[in-house]
Amino acid sequence: MTTEHITDYHAKYFAYELTRQRRGGDVDRLATSLFDASVDLNPHQIDAALFALQNPLTKGVLLADEVGLGKTIEAALVICQYWAERRRRLVVIAPAALRKQWATELTEKFHLPTQVLDARTYKQQRDQGIYDPLDQDVISVMSYHFAAKLEPQLRTIPWDLVVIDEAHKLRNAHRESHRTGQAIKRTFAGSRKLLLTATPLQNSLLELYGLSTVIDDQLFGDAISFRRQFMRGGNDIEGLRRRLDEFAKRTLRRQVLEYVQYTERKALTIPFTPSQDEQRLYHLVSGYLEREDSYGVPTRQRHLVSLVIRKLLASSTTAIIQTLETLKERLEALHDRHQVEQDWLERLLKWSPKFGPGAKL
């Protein structure tokens, strides 16, 4: 439609749409997108969402609030705003165990359409006649591994926003040996990104540099320049803070005590002696996990599964039974030469106190 053919009606419509979109730092910009949201918001969450929206020219931001301050809500606010502005090429990259929780949060609390994509659901949609399951008006949620595997398909879509949860898993993405991180960097190099992590660095400032390269390789230059200026001889900490203020925002618990009342927790230690049957079960399961010739758990995932199972042994007999049943099903499938289902590890982890259905984002 050319300017000569715009009617008075269309002119009013376009003017209304322009007023709705507002500038990035305007709190009213979030009002319409949150009209139906079923959440109670805190001031720091609004601030974080506006920080992520305020500069459309940057390639992304890092939200690094302490655990329990609602980074998921902050990211969902940003997603809601993009959706309200009809920018709907949106994707969430998260650990496999958190995919369904992300989809549930976005659907139930913000009434946004979502789909959890993995190898099976992707194939099912293709078989149903959907040419490109990624190219739909729905928020796609997928794991790190699947996103890296799907690099060629993901790169064909001009994503409006990429949310990366537990982003500290990519702190070594600047290294060529980190294949998943390298694939995600290549895939979303031209897209705006929103990184979420409670631990932006653990052992070295270089991990912070690695996260910055996921947003934009040019934020700090190369690793050698970063070391020279901020780590070795330079130690320009104030300069680093100024640079971080441009793309990173972190809120601490002590900063929100005015309006978030945390329950005082006191640990009680109760002596417990396991029965002979419980001790025998523990030793039997531990012995099985330590076997080098075990087919029940793939070698690459043995460490994670061993940690989960040992937690379950101290948690619930019912939980460990369900986990052992999952391992049994895998062994039977291998014995019968059937293909092992892709989500077997997710089904195993759901019984863990840390990864289960009750876990919070």
Image (tube, rainbow, N blue to C red):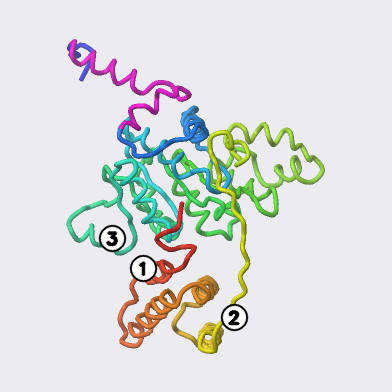
Residue 323 horizontal/vertical position (percent): 41, 76
Say which of marks 3 and 1 sits in front: 1
Q: Compared to 143, does 45 lie above or below?
A: above
Q: Nearer the viewer, residue 278 or 311?
A: 278
Residue drawn at (53%, 47%) of the image: 68
Residue 264 horizontal/vertical position (percent): 59, 49
Residue 40 horizontal/vertical position (percent): 41, 37
What residue span does the magenta drawing correspond to?
8-35
For residue 353: magenta? no
Is tag 3's residue or tag 2's residue first in the polypeptide sequence? Answer: 3
**Amino acid at dot 3:** Thr
**Residue, disc 2:** 273
Q: Is residue 38 left or right of residue 57?
A: left
Query: What crowding class fits label 1: few (fewer than 14 Cα within 10 Å), some (14-19), or many (20 or more)?
Result: some
**Residue, disc 3:** 121
Counting the numbered discs, the total is 3
**Amino acid at dot 2:** Thr
Viewer can see residue 291: no
Residue drawn at (48%, 24%) of the image: 25
Is tag 3's residue or tag 1's residue first in the polypeptide sequence? Answer: 3
Q: Nearer the viewer, residue 8 or 328?
A: 328
Viewer can see residue 257: yes
**Amino acid at dot 1:** Asp
Query: What crowding class fits label 2: few (fewer than 14 Cα within 10 Å), some (14-19), or many (20 or more)?
Result: few
